[in-house]
């Protein structure tokens, strides 16, 4: 059987790979703790459930317009004005099957073979692979100061005549960093000056801690016209804990949206009408659940940071948002893939290797589970790695002895 070169070149999802390994251990009855998960345990908003259920009870479940149902598009228009301070029309919006699908459709729409897309490290694992899937070239620009935000000078230096777009994810998966307003202003200005598309992946922009806010990309844009190359991607997965609904959207100029509609019409027709109705219910309904989730995550973040600071060899920059932190474990082992496998095998803790996000020596740890899971998970990691920890630990109802160096 022959598989295309493109398919052979696409990497396996590291998060799904770790989930599969953890699932096999769980099936054997092992007490696995998952610190790699990217979805909170909070419930979906009632307004979303009621809206989706109301559509189901009509028994009239049909195709929708490719760009999405009117009620959801109007909800996104209102949301964009309230959350970004940007007035748009319904012609500036397309609904897709999650923010990942939105970004894929954007790449198909914007990128020609050999075009370059600048991706800031640490980055979400799918960005480089999506760019490769449309025969573009991912250009990675990483930080050099031990923090998580590259310099504008390095980004500009990485630009060439082939550069088509820059992707910025703030708040950032995997680091939890919120890019400062000065940086957002500079990257907007730079992309406008160079006539380069700036894609803002804002899927976590409501989940920011300690009174901080994710800066609206439109605030510093000089070009507020319908020819702007500024693009915002968002969705309901994170702020409403609606990961399984797979509804995201893109806000862009009308020419981009028109092209994306043609692309989407050929690759998936339209998102499910039931799930779109549920998303509209979430956006139009009571918003208290978003704040409750944010506060829960902020508390969990504090717990995880405090637990990790008990590690002598771990360096951590406290995250300002999202579900994740990206501590540096290189003092114990520089190979993050090997370290992640080791921790799953020895401590039954799921983590995600930093190498997959463009920062070797780090592990991505999620704090969107319970406080108990966070504390026990970090305790197991400390036991497995820190030679100053006691040699024995109970995992579940079994006693484990550290018999390695």
Image (spheres, rainbow, N blue to C red):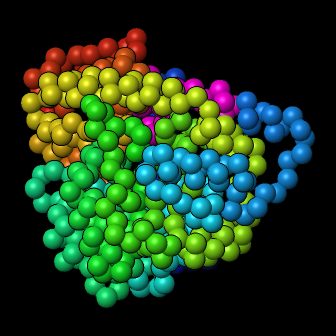
Q: Is residue 329 left or right of residue 49?
A: left
Dominant SS of magenta comes to: loop
First to last magenta residue range: 31-49
Q: Position of residue 279 (x, y in %)?
A: 64, 42
Residue placed furthest toward the top: 397
- Which residue is nearer to you in this view: 158 or 252? 252
Question: Percent x, y for residue 321?
Answer: 32, 39
116 vs 82, nearest the viewer:
82
Identify the residue shown where x is 53% and y is 47%: 79
On the image, which quarter does residue 329 sit in? top left
In percent of the image, x 56 and y 48: which residue is there? 78
Residue 47 lies left or right of residue 113; in this view the side is right
Reply above or below: 378 against 38. above
Q: Is residue 88 visible?
A: yes
Question: Is 30 covered by the magenta stretch?
Answer: no
> How far across and how far down the image is residue 178, in percent?
28, 47
Quadrant housing the N terminus: bottom right
The relative height of residue 245 versus residue 252 in the rendered view (above or below) is above
Write the residue at 14% across / 21% down: 389
Q: Residue furthest right?
A: 59
The magenta stretch spans residue 36: yes
Point out the image quarter for the C terminus.
top left
Compared to residue 259, the image places residue 312 above or below, namely above
Q: Check the image and name the residue furthest to the bottom.
A: 161
The x, y position of residue 131, in whole percent, is 45, 71
Q: How many marks?
A: 0
Asked if 199 appears above or below 48 in the picture, the reply is below
Give the residue drawn at x 73%, y 30%: 50
Q: Is residue 337 left or right of residue 100?
A: left
Q: Nearer the viewer, residue 154 or 13?
A: 154
Q: Is residue 126 visible?
A: no
């Amino acid at each position: 059987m022959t598989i295309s070169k493109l398919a052979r070149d696409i990497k396996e999802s590291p998060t799904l790979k770790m989930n599969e390994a953890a699932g096999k251990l769980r099936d054997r009855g092992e007490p696995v703790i998952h610190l790699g998960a990217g979805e909170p345990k909070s419930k979906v908003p009632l307004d979303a459930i009621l809206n989706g259920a109301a559509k189901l009870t009509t028994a009239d479940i049909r195709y929708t317009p490719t760009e999405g149902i009117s009620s959801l598009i109007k909800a996104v228009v209102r949301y964009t004005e309230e959350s970004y301070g940007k007035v748009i029309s319904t012609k500036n919006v397309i609904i897709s099957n999650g923010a990942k699908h939105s970004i894929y459709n954007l790449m198909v729409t914007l990128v020609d073979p050999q075009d370059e897309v600048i991706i800031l490290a640490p980055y979400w694992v799918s960005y480089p692979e999506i760019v490769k899937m449309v025969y573009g070239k991912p250009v990675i620009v990483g930080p050099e100061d031990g923090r998580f935000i590259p310099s504008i000078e390095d980004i500009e230096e990485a630009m060439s005549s082939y550069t088509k777009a820059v992707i910025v994810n703030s708040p950032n998966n995997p680091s939890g960093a919120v890019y400062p307003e000065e940086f957002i202003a500079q990257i907007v200005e730079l992309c406008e000056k160079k006539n380069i598309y700036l894609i803002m992946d804002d899927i976590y922009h409501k989940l920011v801690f300690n009174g901080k806010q994710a800066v609206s990309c439109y605030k510093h844009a000089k070009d507020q016209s319908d020819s702007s190359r500024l693009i915002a991607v968002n969705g309901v997965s994170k702020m409403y804990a609606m990961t399984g609904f797979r509804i995201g959207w893109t806000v862009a100029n009308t020419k981009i949206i028109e092209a994306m509609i043609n692309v989407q019409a050929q690759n998936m027709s339209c998102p499910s009408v039931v799930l779109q109705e549920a998303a509209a219910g979430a956006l139009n309904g009571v918003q208290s659940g978003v704040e409750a989730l944010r506060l829960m995550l902020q508390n969990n973040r504090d717990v995880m940071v405090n637990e990790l600071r008990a590690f002598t060899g771990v360096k951590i920059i406290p995250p300002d948002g999202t579900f994740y932190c990206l501590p540096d474990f290189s003092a114990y082992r520089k190979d993050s893939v090997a370290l992640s496998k080791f921790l799953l095998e020895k401590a039954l803790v799921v983590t995600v290797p930093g190498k997959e996000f463009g920062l070797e020596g780090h592990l991505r740890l999620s704090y969107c589970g319970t406080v108990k899971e966070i504390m026990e998970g970090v305790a197991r990691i400390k036991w497995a790695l820190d030679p100053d920890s006691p040699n024995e630990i109970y995992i579940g109802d079994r006693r484990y002895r550290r018999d390695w160096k």
